[in-house]
Amino acid sequence: MPEITYREAVRDALTRALREDEDVFIMGEDIAEMGGSMAVTQGLLDEFGPKRVRNTPISEMAIVGSGIGAAMQGMRPIVEIMYEDFLTLSMEQLVNQAAKHRTMSGGQLKVPLTIRTQGGAGWSPGAQHAQQLEAWFVHVPGLKVVFASTPEDVRGLLWSSIYDDNPVVFFEHRTLYPLKGEVPDELEPIPLGKARIHREGEDVTVVATGRLVHDALEAAAEAESEGISVEVVDPRTLLPLDEETIVESVKKTTRCVTAHEAVVRGGFGSELAAVIQHGAFDYLDAPIERVGSKFAPLPFAPVMEQHVVPHAEDVLEAIRRTVRRVG
Amino acid sequence: MAKVEEKAGSGGRRVSGDVLRTFFREMLLIRRFEEKVEERFRAGELPGFLHVAIGQEAVATGVCAALEREDVIASTHRAHGHTIAKGTSIDKVMAELYGKVEGCSGGFGGSMHLYDLEVGNLGANAVVAGGLPAVVGAALAFQFRGEKRVAVAFFGDGATNAGTFHESLNLAQLWKVPAIFVLENNGWAESTPNTQHSPLSIDELGKRALAYGMKLIEADGQDVEAVHLATLAAREHALSGKGPVLLHLRTYRLVGHYIGDPQVYRDKEELKRERETKDPIDLLRARLELSDEEFEKLDGEITAEVEASVEFAKAGTDPKPEDALKYVYA
């Protein structure tokens, strides 16, 4: 199995879809000659030309909205929104239009649109280039929401998102782009709505997304040296959610920590906690702990930024808290 | 598409009398339909929030008659006229207003979300200017595939202040996609007059196209022939590869923003004057020199059709409550 980076894995899925399917095209800000602000689309202009690799004006409503229109005509547009902070500019089109056309039309229309975006702290951009807003979209019926954490997952999930007949908001994490991992020789689509158990354990389940999957694995290794066996589950698709895998895991371990980089309040961890307490109420031996950012716009100074966002130590501390509850 | 005759010797175009009569019939059908909707709403039979297009019939008919079936439209909250003119039967529209399975959106959409994919209606939008970006995308798909089709967005003067309007015009002109932006300028953004919503005067709103280097075509929105010829010209331009067109049509909303709107914001004398001098149906009737007898006969037929649409709708099937979740995902 070849080893590639998360960035290359995204590019590989895009390349294959563009090669195989005339209905696929990509558009976004700076994605052509520049290759995207994260260099994900580098080289695609050379292979596929400016018609299918389209630079756009800085115009998020029109970028997303024109993607919707092309998708309604049966194309499979892939739109890149440079930073997920800028998704806020296209919220009307995503929430009122993309998500609702199918229902409003009584099933006449489909919107097979993929919105790729990225975010994440750790490089001191300040408050408007690193938020994690995935939970906003989980609240909208009609959208699907994906957040991939490894090269293998990001490739297989992006492929499935492109070929899903619904609008999919696809989150990538900025700090994961250089991450290397093995992928199958041939692209294997990963179905949306299937969680991945990264590590099996007996005492505590950590349900983590994005960068925090890796922090959770680090925390789990540390916990093991303290005699705590940790299971790490990545939902991968936040909407629809693989509730069964998550609930079954917690029934086994009886304790749960949720972990994401987004702020805790109203974050995806809150939804997970609700699902888990309902599905595994009689099994829980401790309150569910939620790990996430402190409730503040991201500050610029690196020491403050690092104070706000969660790290492996925060996950480890939460694991310890759940275990301490039962003496 | 209706036939257009070349006017002998002038090099100009005009619409034949026969075609104008078909336009008249459709405009009267829309008018009687809308009046019936007002009546049934006031009788408490229709749920929801309804906006009728009384006074704006020449826009719907003149534009849609210039389109081919495979051309697509996106409409607004004031959608009944556009929908009927694009080819959806009044039975299906009325059934939708009654929330029935037989409705053009299966009871899922309602008055502000009329869809009919079979005739190229991509849906009416209840967010002002919300439908414009998707029209750019539909036109982009036609351009990609080399199809001779246009995508048409209807919207009002109020929409020209929304970001989506400006972003859509910019992108459409940049990519020269075959789109027509129909500015149905009735001078009101709901209850707010043009003088309070735009720094441009009411007749100048079309100039906004020029900021994007876009072709502007203007016509009197109460004159169905003028609307029709302007739309044909816009369609030709859009399909020529030169880019989209802003089609600016000055029209008059001869009723309130919504059914039941007391219009406290409107000068009653002015409204009366507009009703007397700007009604597109009166104007066309005079031009066609229809006798009272001819008019009564036609009106009788149309009134019966509209009555029948109410009967059709009332006899329709109520959706099962649990079907509400049927189309959340494809």
Image: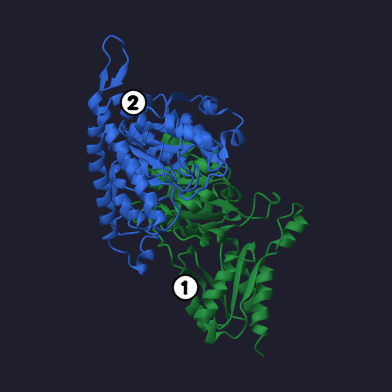
| Alpha carbon distance from label 2 to label 1 | 60 Å
Q: Quadrant of the N terminus of chain B?
A: top left
Q: Which residue is mark 2?
A: B225
* Callout 2: chain: B
Q: Quadrant of the C terminus of chain B?
A: bottom left
The chain displayed green equals A
Give the numbered dot on residue A243.
Answer: 1
Q: Nearer the viewer, residue A176 or A100?
A: A100
Please provide percent x and percent y for residue A48: 41, 37
Q: Nearer the viewer, residue B74 or B50?
A: B50
Q: Nearer the viewer, residue B110 or B47?
A: B47
Q: Amino acid at mark 1?
A: Glu
Q: Residue at the spot x=26%, y=34% of the render?
A: B295
- Identify the hue of chain B: blue
Are discs 2 and 1 both within one chain?
no
Nearest to viewer (mark 2 / mark 1): 2
